[in-house]
Image (tube, rainbow, N blue to C red):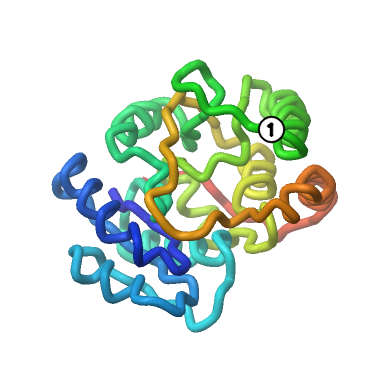
Amino acid sequence: MLIVMPALNEQASVGTVISQVKQSLPGMDVLVVDDGSSDDTAKLARAAGAEVARLSVNLGVGGAMRTGFRYAAARGYDVVVQVDADGQHDPDEVAALLDALDDADIAIGSRFAGKGAYKASGPRKYAMVVLSFVFSRLGKTKLTDVTSGFKAMGPRAIKMFAAYYPAEYLGDTVESLVMAIRAELKIKEIPVIMRERAGGTPSHSPVKSAVYLGRAGLALLLALVRRRPAVDSSDSA
């Protein structure tokens, strides 16, 4: 099992998050993908005991996770868990995601499935409502938090995403889920509690939030119409 932690200028929190992961999940390997940081993120991640892959330029979460999936596939990992480096994802919740992989290919940690009091507002709220409705219909299962970055993925998902993982804006959530549904991977949602950021700068500014609904809709439309090379996601084990 491998924790993949995309990180951009997260020197204020990355060391603490890694320590929490190692305390909650002893023996779990951790890979921090430094997504073109200009601070000491990579240095502090190594000091905390993580492996570090440094990207020379900022590729976004999708590009960082693509690196993580290829690392996992090359080294024979069966499970990849995506955990943010800003402290919002509680490592104590990872066990529930791993349990869900007993009968699923992807387990998504949901902020809106009945655990905790997280609330979205404004354009982001409307985007999440629309996306949840669409993906629940596409996936034929109730999905309330399709933009969650707190996920666990099993062997079939790793194999598919190592071959191709979208790096465009929202591709790591919206388009990757469309890919998974088209590949007939089983997706399951698990209620989790999301915490406040431990440090760093939020990835979405107020200006970006104002156009979030339109961009989310465009991302979904592109994901639905875009053709991708066929990828065999079957588990050869």
Percent position of residue 183, x then y: 63, 42
Above or below, comparing residue 36 to residue 203 in the picture: below
The amino acid marked with disc number 1 is Ser
Q: Going by the image, does 126 lie left or right of 188? A: right
Above or below, comparing residue 154 to residue 203 in the picture: above
How many other residues sit within 10 Å of disc 1, few (<14), some (14-19) or many (≥20)?
few
- In the rendered image, is residue 22 in sight? yes
Residue drawn at (69%, 25%) of the image: 136
- In the rendered image, is residue 236 in sight? no
Which residue was labeled with disc 1?
Answer: 121
Q: How many marks?
A: 1
- Front one among 78 and 172: 172
Residue furthest top as drawn? 114
Q: Going by the image, does 32 lie left or right of 217? A: left
Q: Going by the image, does 25 lie left or right of 197? A: left
Mark 1: which secondary structure? loop
Residue drawn at (54%, 31%) of the image: 186
Percent position of residue 182, x then y: 69, 40
Residue drawn at (63%, 42%) of the image: 177
Residue drawn at (39%, 57%) of the image: 5
Percent position of residue 196, x then y: 43, 41
Please tell me in which quadrant of the rendered image residue 208 appears: bottom right
Percent position of residue 18, x then y: 26, 55
